[in-house]
Amino acid sequence: MSSSCINFPASPSVLKTASRFSLHTLSPRSWAVSFARMSILAVLENAITVGHLTISDSEGTHYYGTYQKGCNDVHLNVINDTFWLRILMSGDLGFSEAYMIGDVEVSTGLKGAMHLWLENESGMADTLSSTVAKVSSAISGLYNSFLGQTRSQARLNAIASYDQSNELFKAFLSKEMMYSCALWSEAEGGVRGDLEMGPTPGDLEAAQRRKIHHVLRAARVKPGHRILEFGSGWGGLAIE
């Protein structure tokens, strides 16, 4: 018995509905960008209490805070919608990355945007940071549920982090090649010494020694004690 092909005429309403739900609209990336954009814009409603922020993208312009003459008035122009995903996933670090690669332009320069962030830091911490934490936690949970942390994945993570030549680390670390933050004093010009005075020979090493001695004093390490050193560099703390 042969099967027949039956064609039903498509009504205008059906075609309209189909066009509304295009493949692009239903793509995972498009959905993720829309979710990120809506979440961040909703958060900014309550987060910006000092200064004025204008955000423009392909879908329109939004205003936050209250504009007053002489206030910190920042205008963000979103060039690439990946900007929203970066902010949702990484907060202020995501914004910095988006600025560096050109996903967003800032009318007042990066300094004005950072000032606006700092002036509204409490609101940002209570809203945006908590939203980012919840989303990151959910994504991490889904990732671990489907993929998990296998031995091969752990090996790849280690290779990506540590399988680099020492020349790379020597370019920006002290002679001990310690990752952790140094303790800068006025002898090195404080934490802004390199920005205001420029680096001087041995200043990073001195700040790292100060950090090591501070840790040893806090841990009350005395002659004869044994130390298990993990994650402080290439053995600098144990050697000291």
Image (cartoon, rainbow, N blue to C red):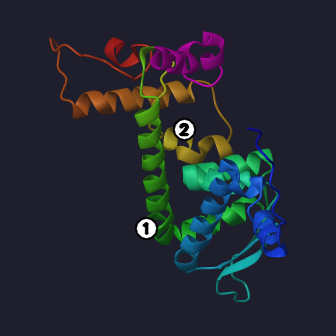
Q: Earlier in the sequence, mark 2 or mark 1?
A: 1
Visible residue check, residue 108? no
Give yes or no for contact between labels 2 and 1 (Cβ–Cβ under 8 Å).
no
Visible residue check, residue 30? yes
**What secondary structure prevails in the magenta region?**
helix
Residue 149 point in image, percent of width and height = 42, 25
* Residue on which disc 1 sits: 126
Seen from the viewer's position, the closer of residues 96 and 227 is 96
Image mark for residue 188: 2
Q: What residue type is labelled 2?
A: Glu
Q: How crowded is mark 1: few (under 14 residues within 10 Å), some or many (20 or more)?
A: few
Range covered by the magenta-colored residues: 152-174
170 magenta-colored: yes
Residue 62 point in image, percent of width and height = 72, 78
Residue 199 point in image, percent of width and height = 65, 34
91 shown above or below 124:
above
Does residue 162 appear to the left or right of 68 in the view shown? Answer: left
